[in-house]
Amino acid sequence: MYLFRLIVGALLLSVLFPNIANAQLLVNKSFSPANIPPAATSTLTIQIFNNTATAATAVNLTDNLPTSPTGLTIGPGGLLSNSCGGTVTATPGTTTVTLTGGAVAASSGGVAGQCTITVQVQTVAASAGQSYSNTIPIANVSSSIGGSVSPATATLSVSGVNAITGSKTFTPTNLHGNGPATRMRIQLNNSNSFPLTNVAFTDNFPTQLELAATPNVSNSCGGAVTAVGGGFSLALSGGTIPASGNCVIQADVVARLPNTSPNDGNATNSIAANNVTSAQGARNTAAISRTIRVQKAASVTKAFSPAGIVAGGSSTLTITLRNFNATAISGFNFTDTMPAGITVVGPATTTCGGTASLLPLP
């Protein structure tokens, strides 16, 4: 009987195996962690055991990572460790780990000799929900004392990804030209059990809005926020939304072209669906929107009462001036020329200040 010590995850297991005729090697493999988020890394551990009294030399092994489904490759860390000697090739971005010319010590005291190779592997965002079964077949192992007793298989599972949700608010909900800014607040929510990284989006404003000259940006999402005073958009890059949590970006927004019409209306500000992205592939499947009322510039309206008269009759003309801005308008002048057939008989009154007067016909 021979004793093999297997490392499975963080556990050290001791297993007795009977003597094997035609001495060969035993290969074991595992992923740690065995379940990871998309676009994350795991450590692939390959152990080679020798239960004979003779050291195994010229040990060669090839481990081809699965290519169906796609998305599992050797990570940027490549080869992490090697106690098997020889040459291990594990090139980042590729799908093959090879050992050539390795050696495994002979068994001693009933405990099999062993060596270990560890390699970093990684998945991509599109790997969400996938499962990768990785096998080293018997034919891919050879040595001076023979090949592998049996195939070595391990499975790496990639978590599915929930969509990013969010909300947007404006405080106050009415915005006046040349008046105080409204505080725009964007909250991004992550219901996944892992952080979402490299989060990015661009929020393009409607024509009625722009960033305040000093946007006063606050940001709990990390990364970099681009928000130029007087600009028409706000963008995040390289952000992180914590696991089962949220992050918030805020900035001051004012009315664009405050002295130019349109005067009074609603503006809807939206981050379009799928515009918020992450390294893990999570996106916002629904738009993140909020409507704000924007009142700016001035308007002039006029009305006759009554609106219809007989020849020789009279009607009262009312001219209404409205200022939607937060600052007063002064020095306001206008002339209203009546069409042929209508005579202004007065008197003219005003609540606008200045002087209201009747001018003779030309």
Image: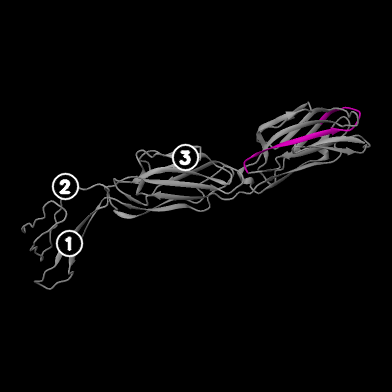
For the residue carrying disc 1, how many other residues have a C-alpha within 10 Å: few (<14), some (14-19), or many (20+)?
Answer: some
Give percent across and percent down for residue 52.
90, 31
**For residue 144, which numbered disc appears in the image?**
none
The residue to which callout 1 is attached is 318
Dots 1 and 3: beta carbons under 8 Å?
no
Residue closer to the observer: 14 or 62: 14
Residue 82 can be seen, yes or no = yes
The residue at 82%/33% (across/down) is: 48
Label 3 secondary element = strand
Give percent across and percent down for residue 202.
46, 44
* Dot 3 or dot 2, earlier in sequence: 3
Of the residues shown, which amino acid type is indicated by label 3?
Asn
Inter-mark Cα distance, 1 to 3: 51 Å
- Asked if the stretch drawn in magenta spans residue 269, the answer is no
Label 2 secondary element = loop
Q: Residue furthest toward the top?
A: 85
**For residue 219, which numbered disc appears in the image?**
3
Residue closer to the observer: 128 or 264: 264
Label 3 vs label 2, nearer the camera: 3
The residue to which callout 2 is attached is 331
Q: Give the magenta range.
A: 38-59
Label 1 secondary element = strand
* Dot 2 or dot 1, earlier in sequence: 1
Of the residues shown, which amino acid type is indicated by label 2?
Gly
Q: Quadrant of the C terminus?
A: bottom left
Residue closer to the observer: 30 or 166: 166
